[in-house]
């Protein structure tokens, strides 16, 4: 694209330079020779011809110069615009990395397959290759209007080599970056989230090879006060990837979105007292990113060790057995059951959905446990040992990082999602299911499509404060004169448009002055 633009640019310069003498030919009554006028004979008729050709070439000069400016601007923009992120990006754990969420922790509470039997299936009848797809080129297409009437999903056709890369621990990052570049060559920077979904069944082998059930890469951050560095960039906030088609319904879709803002405000620890970044670890955060809601002290100075306390924690319920233990003990350090739970108060604060005052009103505290250990049974039923508890109020967090800016009163709450289906076309029977999942996940709080699964969509998980929009992807396609890459379109007027406008104005001015020139030269 850039090479072609440069070629046209050089041709335009040549035509413009050859045409400029014609302007002088008009002004000086044809006395200045040019490549055409030197062949004309002297005389009034020749003079008319000469000046007439001069006028035409003057117009050609203006057109050529306008084209030169336009193509030069397009060539420059096309060569210098950056993609929404590069391979280094802004990482979740540290700059340039992705946040991985292990397959064993995303859904610890009996994951159910969406289409495992007829009574719980959400699949639509869609057999064979979809003949109604709208081809966008480079393997990209929109599904047929019969399957996706609101245009909510972009399909990317992948071959066996790409599938291998997308399911490989050391290769998926580069492949996703390459696919993102391809997508943004055709779409404007209109989206807050780019969600890649592999059109495959939930497969422990795939997740085992990748080492995660979901991953998030934050591309830009304009929010301060959440423990993240503020970084520039386009509109795109995060790129997410899940290797199973049912992840929008069962999770970890909510979990991965939360990584855009959380959890970076303090150090957290696992059962071996190792740092547990980007998740709540052993704490009372009790949200999408781990932690419990309820805790009881079992034994102080446990085993005769001063300061060592035995605890039992539960995420689900504080209902007790006769001996005082939790009936449903247990919790996840990095997740608590996929989409089966809403966001916690601290997560909603970091997302800009709840104010600091709302947390003060409920006497919120974030308790981080450290000096942790477990016995031979591990964390079965939620038992663990700890030697220290660090308590943070919301004002303590603000003292560490400053207030959240923008706060809950002015923060963005409505987001735009681009869902990308990665398909090798052996999974066409899942297309309608994925579309229905997108419609539900981005739907309102009263959408009970999957209520039998006990799951939350984004609006429900934020108590109706936040929303996602996924419809009308066609409206975000680039037009033919737009340079590829992500550009700053905040002004609403592109450089190419300005140059064309100036060129047209110049031509109009010249044509208005043309009668004066003709009278002056008695043509």
Image (cartoon, rainbow, N blue to C red):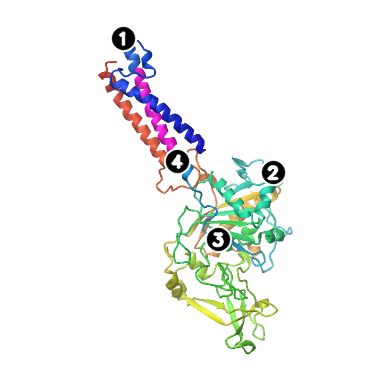
The residue that disc 2 covers is 129
> Along the polypeptide, which appears first: circle 1 or circle 3?
1
505 sits left or right of 91 in the view: left
Q: Is residue 53 visible?
A: yes
Q: Which residues are magenta?
A: 52-72
Q: Disc number at residue 257?
A: 3
**Mark 3–mark 2 distance (CA, rounded to whole Å):** 31 Å
Question: Does 95 appear above or below 332?
Answer: above
Q: What SS does tag 4 mark?
A: helix
- The answer to whether the residues at label 2 and label 4 have Cβ atoms under 8 Å apart is no
Instruction: From the top left corner, tell me how far across and down residue 210 is, in percent.
Output: 66, 59
The residue that disc 4 covers is 76
Question: Does 96 appear above or below 180?
Answer: below
Q: Disc number at residue 43?
A: 1
Q: Nearer the viewer, mark 3 or mark 2?
A: 3
> Along the polypeptide, which appears first: circle 2 or circle 4?
4
Q: What SS does tag 1 mark?
A: loop
125 sits left or right of 444 in the view: right
Of 444 and 128, nearer the camera is 128
Q: Residue furthest left?
A: 520
**Mark 2–mark 4 distance (CA, rounded to whole Å):** 41 Å
Instruction: From the top left corner, tell me how far across and down residue 124 is, in percent.
Output: 68, 51
Residue 60 magenta-drawn? yes
- The answer to whether the residues at label 4 and label 1 have Cβ atoms under 8 Å apart is no
Classed neighbour count for the residue bearing mark 1: other residues with Cα under 10 Å, few (<14), some (14–19), many (≥20): few
């Amino acid at each position: 694209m850039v090479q072609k633009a440069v070629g046209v640019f050089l041709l335009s310069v040549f035509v413009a330079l050859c045409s400029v003498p014609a302007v002088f030919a008009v002004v000086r009554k044809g006395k200045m020779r040019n490549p055409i006028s030197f062949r004309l004979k002297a005389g009034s008729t020749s003079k008319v011809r000469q000046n007439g050709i001069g006028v035409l070439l003057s117009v050609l000069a203006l057109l050529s110069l306008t084209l030169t400016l336009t193509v030069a601007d397009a060539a420059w923009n096309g060569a210098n615009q950056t993609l929404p992120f590069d391979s280094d990006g802004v990482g979740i754990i540290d700059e340039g990395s992705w946040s991985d969420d292990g397959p064993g922790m995303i859904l610890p509470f009996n994951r159910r397959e969406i289409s495992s039997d007829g009574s719980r299936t959400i699949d639509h009848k869609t057999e064979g290759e979809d003949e109604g797809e709208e081809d966008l080129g480079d393997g990209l297409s929109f599904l047929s209007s019969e399957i996706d009437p609101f245009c909510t999903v972009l399909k990317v056709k992948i071959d066996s080599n790409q599938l291998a890369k997308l399911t490989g621990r050391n290769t998926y990052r580069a492949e996703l970056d390459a696919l993102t570049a391809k997508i943004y060559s055709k779409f404007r920077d209109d989206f807050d989230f780019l969600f890649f979904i592999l059109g495959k069944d939930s497969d422990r082998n795939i997740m085992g090879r990748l080492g995660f059930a979901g991953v998030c890469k934050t591309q830009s951050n304009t929010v301060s006060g959440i423990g993240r560095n503020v970084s520039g960039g386009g509109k795109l906030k995060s790129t997410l990837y899940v290797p199973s088609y049912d992840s929008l319904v069962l999770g970890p879709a909510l979990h991965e979105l939360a990584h855009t803002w959380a959890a970076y405000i303090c150090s957290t620890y696992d059962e071996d007292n190792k740092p547990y970044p980007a998740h709540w670890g052993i704490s009372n955060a009790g949200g999408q990113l781990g932690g419990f809601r309820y805790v009881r002290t079992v034994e102080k100075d446990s085993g005769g060790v001063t300061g060592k306390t035995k605890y039992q924690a539960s995420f689900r319920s504080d209902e007790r057995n006769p001996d005082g233990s939790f009936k449903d003990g247990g919790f996840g350090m990095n997740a608590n059951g996929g989409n089966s739970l809403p966001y916690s108060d601290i997560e909603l604060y970091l997302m800009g959905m709840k104010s600091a005052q709302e947390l003060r009103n409920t006497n919120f505290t974030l308790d981080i446990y450290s000096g942790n250990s477990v016995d031979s049974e591990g964390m079965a039923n939620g038992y663990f040992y700890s030697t220290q508890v660090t308590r943070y109020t919301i004002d303590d967090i603000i003292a560490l990082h400053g207030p959240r800016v923008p706060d809950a009163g002015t923060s963005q709450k409505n987001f735009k999602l681009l869902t990308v289906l990665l398909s090798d076309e052996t999974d066409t029977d899942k297309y309608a299911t994925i579309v229905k999942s997108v419609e539900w996940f981005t739907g309102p709080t009263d959408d009970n499509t999957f209520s039998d699964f006990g799951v939350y969509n984004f609006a429900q998980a934020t108590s109706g404060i936040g929303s996602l929009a996924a419809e009308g992807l066609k409206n975000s396609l680039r037009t033919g004169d737009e340079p590829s890459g992500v550009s700053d379109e905040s002004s609403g007027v592109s450089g190419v448009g300005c140059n064309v406008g100036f060129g047209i104005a110049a031509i109009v001015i010249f044509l208005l002055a043309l009668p004066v020139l003709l009278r002056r030269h008695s043509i």
